[in-house]
Image (tube, coloured by chain):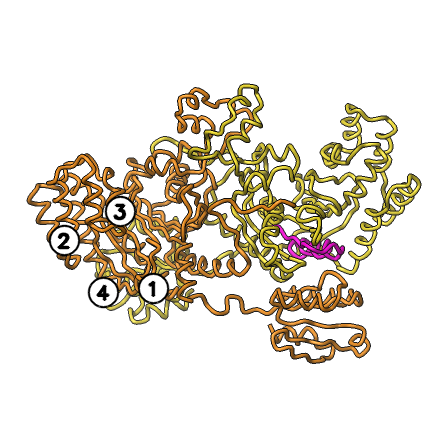
Chain colours: A yellow, B orange
């Protein structure tokens, strides 16, 4: 491999040290999911395009990594579409599969495929990679790990709160500072869009979602470029400016919706959720109603939430989720779902910057037998016996210069080097050298195994 | 999701139970790799095509899953190539990335990208998915887990033996019966191809590799359709029919190569390897020289090995590997590599059929609090405290009919149900029902936590 090759844009390699940290974080997440009795599933890395498209929204569909048809299937290329510059149509004629874009739509496919084997409510967790062809930026990659928990088949708000409690427990275990969880309800947003005389909230969702970046005034400015009356925009401005406690926000909303004859369904649900949340004693989470929270994905129908990163970090949200009533199955039986997602890489970044990773990610010691080209039989037998006891050890794989072997030990972070050369063989002993201190002691060969075991 | 959706051809979902078994196998592998002091790395799921192509062979290149270019890049489509039925060229104009086909070429890219940060010999392990657009069959999928260990930067045969010892240790830990490890050397095959007056062994590698399926006579038959002299074919027939012990095979080869003035390099290496292997005391592996073993991948240059499945299984090899002298870097410094791969799914299948998975993959107990719509505060507090202690428990997420809640417990395999209804609240007690036996006992509420802890 003579020319220089690199990882593709937006993707990363992970070294051994990084993987130990990632494993720590993943274990905290998985152990927490398990203690809540969520059951793990895994799905394939790619799905049929018919499964994926039309669930997320048009912009998102364009960010999927599609897989090029292979063999003769590529003959289906729609050359006319290409000539007429219909690139999206051309592209669809070349592919019938795409890499996973999230874990929720594959879950929904999993359930519909295994409907008879699943008992509901189905609490599942899934920690797998997802891929998005977005422009890479700090904390945002094209390949990243997503960690999801979802409860399918039960619409009681206890499910929302169980999932929020998962956030709370994980953040608590990780030692994170208290974070804000913004909450809203798509039905409330539909109410607002009625007040604004829009067909659906989806029309303004992407603008609304920018509120925490560009502020309410910024949103107003963007909306003025659209075909909206001043009255509509002022209505929204009034709503977004409602301040006070969660209870006060709900009271104001209720009054307004009532006066305009708009359904109170979403307000009632949010009210009950906020009220019941007090029984859950969240220690690491502040729940705040935020009427500007819209969340882009088109499959949400009820509660939507998003977890902000701790105040000192400006890397956006570290998690989010919502209720999707119609994604899995609308009838026979209706399977409403609620689920949340952890932004693994952003949480990793925060742990790194706040120095919250444990000091000793791996407390076991490692040993290297120097290779003098002699006594291979007995050394190999020691190596064998130690590995049987799960002690990390190795024989240097060539009879190289001792300096080279010690350099190797140093660079690899080996804790102890074991020396059995001519001299040691004669005196029935071995030398044990602690690499960090440089301390070296001579020990009777018959004690080798017990001595090393005691150090591990 | 009203229409029926399925997993794409050759891919699978994994249920919670399957994942527990997969986790068990993966942990045996990883713990063994760690005890040998291999260091873990991970690489992205896709690589640039320039990194991947030309390393495996033409057939293999066509089996890669390519990723369709997105956005404006698709304008580069080579329509002329399509019109002239040059589908491979057309396909290449539509893609500049492909999914990982193995773990060795990405490792090689990793090393060349991080050359200054790696100390050699570099012992790495990697357990990640790979994708191949092959026709699915029993034990062969289009997405599967590969588990590799490689040692880069050292050509001593101790590296071959260290890796073979990894096989031995893993199979031993898993309780597998003794398996055959077939061994050959590409330099010996080059010698044979010289005897046959071929340019390179690559010309007959794919036919040779079929020997264990179609027999020596079958191979002879296939070769007769090619432009080869009878003398060449008879020469090969003689070689493949050499029987006896490994030592006898080497003696015969040595005599023949000597008489025809063919380099003895490969024979010497194999001889030394077989000789030294005796010091390693393999308990689960028989090493057998097999001159018909060729292995398709074009990057191999020295020792090649393949592990057969236990005799009663006809699912092909469960692992293989080899030495690749020129893949990573030919000069400054030369980085010779040797590595092996475990066929995770086939080993899984064997463990399943031989009933070698441990009976208790997960020994911890699970608890369900029935939901009567009352006393939520105290129940949530119990749930909280138990989860803090990593005890798996949950509150049924709605005030549903008790039969429905008990059905849920049964189907999910919950071990104990905890009942705190009206009656229990009045008498300051709770009922504990063991689901398997149906046994139920009434216990003072103040002992709830200690009682459950004692059962876990």
The chain containing the residue under callout 1 comes to: A
First of labels 4, 1 by sequence position: 4
Q: Residue A425, which numbered label? A: 4
Mark in front: 3 vs 1 = 3
Measuring from the top left, give residue A333's x and y in whole percent: 70, 54
User: Does the rendering let one see residue A399?
Assistant: no
Mark in front: 2 vs 1 = 2
Measuring from the top left, give residue A225's x and y in whole percent: 77, 23
Give how far apart the Cα atoms at labels 2 and 1 are.
Answer: 53 Å
Give how far apart the Cα atoms at labels 4 and 2 are.
Answer: 42 Å
Q: Are marks 3 and 4 on the same chain?
A: no
Measuring from the top left, give residue A409's x and y in whole percent: 36, 52
Label 3: which residue? B209
Q: Is residue A221 magenta?
A: no
Bin the neighbour count of mark 3 within 10 Å (Cα to Cα): few under 14, some 14-19, many 20 and up.
Answer: some
Mark in front: 4 vs 1 = 4
Label 2: which residue? B242
**Element at label 2:** loop
Give how far apart the Cα atoms at labels 3 and 1 are.
Answer: 53 Å
The chain containing the residue under callout 4 comes to: A
**Element at label 3:** loop
* Picture quarter with the C terminus of chain A: bottom left
Q: Are marks 4 and 1 in contact (CB under 8 Å)?
A: no
Bin the neighbour count of mark 1 within 10 Å (Cα to Cα): few under 14, some 14-19, many 20 and up.
Answer: few
Picture layout, residue B398 above or below residue A21: below
The chain containing the residue under callout 2 comes to: B
Give how far apart the Cα atoms at labels 3 and 4 are.
Answer: 46 Å
The chain containing the residue under callout 3 comes to: B
Q: Are marks 3 and 1 in contact (CB under 8 Å)?
A: no
The foreground one among B321 and B409 is B409
Segment tinted magenta in the rendering: A148-171
Q: Are marks 2 and 1 on the same chain?
A: no
């Amino acid at each position: 491999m003579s020319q220089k090759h690199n990882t593709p844009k937006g993707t990363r390699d992970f070294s051994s040290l990084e993987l130990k940290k990632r494993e720590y974080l993943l274990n905290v997440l998985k152990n927490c999911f398990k203690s809540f009795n969520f059951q793990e599933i895994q799905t394939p890395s790619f799905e049929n395009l018919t499964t994926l498209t039309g669930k997320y929204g048009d912009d998102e569909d364009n960010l999927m990594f599609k897989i090029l048809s292979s063999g003769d299937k590529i003959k289906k290329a729609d050359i006319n579409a290409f000539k007429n510059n219909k690139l999206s149509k051309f592209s669809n004629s070349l592919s019938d599969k795409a890499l996973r874009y999230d874990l929720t739509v594959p879950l929904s496919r999993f359930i519909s495929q295994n409907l008879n084997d699943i008992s509901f409510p189905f609490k599942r967790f899934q920690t797998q990679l997802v891929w998005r062809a977005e422009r890479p930026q700090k904390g945002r990659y094209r390949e990243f790990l997503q960690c999801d928990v979802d409860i399918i088949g039960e619409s009681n708000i206890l499910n929302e709160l169980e999932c929020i409690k998962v956030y709370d427990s994980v953040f608590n275990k990780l030692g994170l500072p208290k974070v804000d969880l913004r909450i809203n309800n798509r039905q409330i947003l539909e109410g607002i869009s009625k007040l604004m005389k829009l067909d659906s909230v989806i029309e303004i969702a992407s603008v609304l979602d920018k509120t925490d970046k560009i502020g309410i005034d910024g949103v107003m400015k963007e909306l003025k470029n659209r075909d909206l009356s001043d009255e509509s925009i002022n209505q929204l401005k009034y709503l977004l400016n409602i301040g006070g406690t969660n209870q006060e926000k709900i009271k104001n909303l209720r009054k307004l919706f009532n006066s305009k004859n708009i359904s109170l369904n979403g307000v009632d649900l949010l009210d009950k959720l906020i009220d019941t949340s007090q029984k859950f004693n969240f220690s690491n989470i502040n729940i705040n109603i935020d009427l500007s929270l819209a969340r882009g994905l088109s499959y949400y129908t009820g509660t939507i939430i998003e977890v902000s990163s701790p105040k000192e970090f400006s890397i956006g949200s570290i998690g989010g989720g919502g209720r999707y009533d119609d994604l899995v199955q609308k009838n026979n039986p209706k399977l409403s779902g609620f689920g949340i997602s952890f932004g693994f890489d952003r949480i990793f970044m925060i742990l790194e910057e706040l120095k919250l990773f444990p000091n000793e990610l791996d407390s076991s010691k490692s040993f290297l037998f120097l290779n003098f080209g002699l006594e291979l039989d007995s050394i190999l037998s020691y190596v064998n016996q130690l590995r049987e006891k799960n002690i990390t050890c190795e024989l240097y794989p060539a009879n190289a210069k001792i300096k080279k072997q010690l350099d190797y030990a140093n660079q690899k972070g080996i804790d102890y080097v074991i020396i059995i050369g001519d001299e040691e063989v004669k005196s029935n002993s071995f030398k044990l050298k602690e690499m960090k201190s440089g301390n070296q002691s001579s020990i009777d060969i018959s004690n080798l195994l017990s001595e090393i075991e005691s150090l591990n």
